[in-house]
Amino acid sequence: MPDLNTIWFVMIGVLLTGYAILDGFDLGVGALHLLTRKDEHRRLMINSIGPVWDGNEVWLVTGGGALFAAFPEVYATVFSGFYLAFMLVLCVLIFRAVAIEFRSKLPMLWWRRMWDVSFSVASIVLSILLGVAFGNIIWGVPLDVQREFAGSFLGLLHPYALLVGVTTLALFMMHGAIYTALKTEGELHEIARGWINNSIIFFVICYGLTTMTTLLYLPHMSQQMRDYPIFFAVPVLTMLAIANIPREIHLGSDFLAFLSSGAAMVGLMTLVAIGIFPTLVLSRPNPDLSLTIYNAASSPATLTIMLIIALIGVPIVLAYTGSIYYIFRGKVKLDTMSY
């Protein structure tokens, strides 16, 4: 049976994966937003995520709260060390939200173009920053003897982290293109189907480069698979999920393509979790100073109490999320209440 520390490692991974899947298509739609020229198409894209985008971000907040409760030392090290990076994330989140709400308040062309650019640029920057954060968790960051961050903001922007950032952007663009095709019809639907093929190619190239770089320079990420060959099923299933996307698009099943994209994201997050376990913050160049699920965890009593609360709260969040998507199912239509 897994111990409480491992259970919470998995729990936080589930919350972050939920955020990646749900807010991932939001960010992907934003990244693709400027590729459309017609005001109607841009309004349709914004309204496709309009009822759900703010609710999707709850998963990120919940993941941060779970990290604080279960692994407070990791929370303190990451949020203090990455302070400038998180402030930048907060700024683009604010600009993105303001752009969605303000874009259609006035009819002037310059006004709408300004907020269109803000919405798209904020989505692209946020996607890359999230990928950079994961890239640094995989690569490792400098920690001192007190296990506090001893680097700089610019030091986080090394080539590997930026490569993971671009790969994350490509993944979200693919996910967002599929979601746009799923939620629209007519001319925009056909345009979105064209985006899907191009974004898949973009993502597969980035994913291949990231995988090769990881295997060459970060052998610890494949150690668990060498020790437990059963884990090799994860990358195989992930590649099958990615390969199934163009098949479902060709068959006209946008919903199954979206599920395949979501399954691919689950597989990718699982690969990261398998690779870093049991480390949460890898210390580079001194791995002995790393923060793990054992030396950075709360007391067993705290983990037990928080697990009980999570078992009550997570089903409520799932029920709320499911009900929202059920209520706003179907194709997007513009009316007087639309953005």
Image (spheres, rainbow, N blue to C red):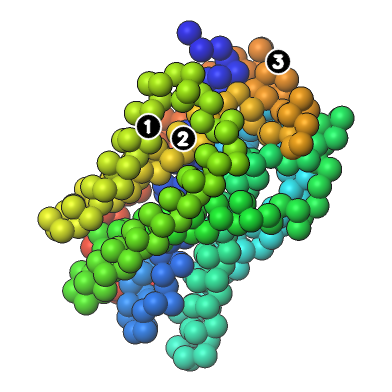
Q: Are marks 1 and 2 in contact (CB under 8 Å)?
A: yes
Badge 2 crowding class, 10 Å Cα cut-off, few under 14, some 14 to 19, many 20 or more, is many
Task: Name the amino acid type tagged 1.
Answer: Val
In front of the other: 171 or 14: 171
* First-in-chain label (1 vs 2): 1
- SS of the residue under disc 2: helix
Residue 114 percent location from the top left of the image = 54, 83
Above or below 46: residue 174: above
Task: Name the amino acid type tagged 3.
Answer: Ser
Q: Are marks 1 and 3 in contact (CB under 8 Å)?
A: no
Label at residue 92: none
- Residue at the disc numbered 1: 234
Residue 129 percent location from the top left of the image = 61, 56
- SS of the residue under disc 3: loop
Residue shown at the point (51%, 36%) measured from the top left: 272
Above or below 165: residue 12: above
**Residue pushed farthest top?**
1
In terms of image quadrants, where is residue 230? top left
Badge 3 crowding class, 10 Å Cα cut-off, few under 14, some 14 to 19, many 20 or more, is some
Above or below 42: residue 175: above
Task: Left or right? Give the position of 233 relative to 55.
Answer: left
